[in-house]
Amino acid sequence: LDTTNNGTVTFNSDGTTTVSAAITAAGAVTFGNTKTGTLTISANISTSDDNITFTRAVTLGASITLDPNAASGSTGNVTFTSSLTATTAGTQTLTIGSAGDKGGVTFTGAVGATPLGNLTIAANDVTFSSTVAVQGAIDIDAVTDGFDTGDVSFANDVTTTGSGTVTISNAGTLTISEGADFNLNGAFTQDGAGAVSLGANITTTQDNISFT
C-alpha cells in the first residue's frame, strides 16, 4: 500500500486486521481504537517524516521495521498506546527508526506478554511506561547527533532471556525508575554521554554491568 501527496492511512475495524504487505505512506499512519477488532502487523511500515500510531493492542505476526522516514533524520514519532506482543516467544523482532532519527518512541502498555525477539530502536526520546519482556537483545540508540534531548526512561520491570543483552546509548538522561528492576540473561551496557538516574536493581546471569 503506497500513498502520495501527504496521503495519510487510517485503519479501524470490528474484525481482524492483518497487515501482511508493506505500507509506504506520504503521511501519517494510524491504527485507531474506535472499533474493537484485533490487529496483527506482519509487514514493514514507513512514512515521509510522519507519525506511526497504534491506539489498540498490537500483535507482531512477523519480524518488522517501523520507520517514520526511510532516510535518517525523521522527526516522526512512533507511539503504542496499548500493549505490544509477539505471536511466538522470541521469534518476531521489532526495529524502529534508523540512526539519526529525531522523533520519539513511546510504549504506554506492556511490551512482550509473549516475549518479542530482538528489540532495536533508534530515536530521540524513548519511553517505556509498563513492563518489557524480550527473548533476545534490547538495543536503544538515543544519540541523535546533538539534535535534541536523547532521553530514555523505564517505569517498570525489564526482563530478557535468550541472548538477552541490553545496550543503551543515551545523549540525554537514562532514567530507570524506582521499582523498575532489570533481570537480564546477558550483559547491561550504558555507553552514551548522558546522565543516569538509577532507582532500581540490575541483575544479570553472571554478565557484566557497565556505565560509561
Image (spheres, helix red, strand yellow):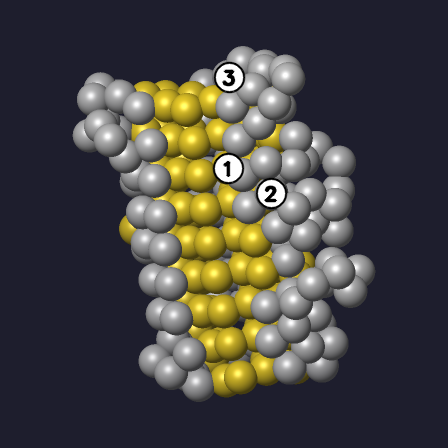
Q: Quadrant of residue 4?
A: top right
Where residue 76 is drawn, which disc sits there? Answer: 2
Location of mark 3 (residue): 21
Does 193 sit left or right of 90 as displayed?
A: right
Label 2, label 3: how far apart the Cα atoms are:
21 Å
Dots 2 and 1: beta carbons under 8 Å?
yes
Indicate the amino acid at tag 2: Gly
Q: Quadrant of the C terminus?
A: bottom right
Q: Secondary structure at mark 1?
A: strand
Looking at the image, tell me whether mark 1 or mark 3 is earlier in sequence order: 3
Looking at the image, tell me whether mark 2 or mark 3 is earlier in sequence order: 3
Indicate the amino acid at tag 1: Ile
Where residue 52 is drawn, which disc sits there? Answer: 1
- Place of residue 49 in the rendered image (x, y in percent of width and height, measured from the top left): 65, 36
Q: Residue at x 59, y 82 (%)?
A: 196
Label 2, label 1: how far apart the Cα atoms are:
7 Å
Q: Residue at x 58, y 60 (%)?
A: 125
Looking at the image, tell me whether mark 2 or mark 1 is earlier in sequence order: 1
Q: Quadrant of the N terminus?
A: top right
Label 1, label 3: how far apart the Cα atoms are:
16 Å
Does 81 sit left or right of 123 as displayed?
A: left
- Place of residue 194 in the rendered image (x, y in percent of width and height, measured from the top left): 68, 77
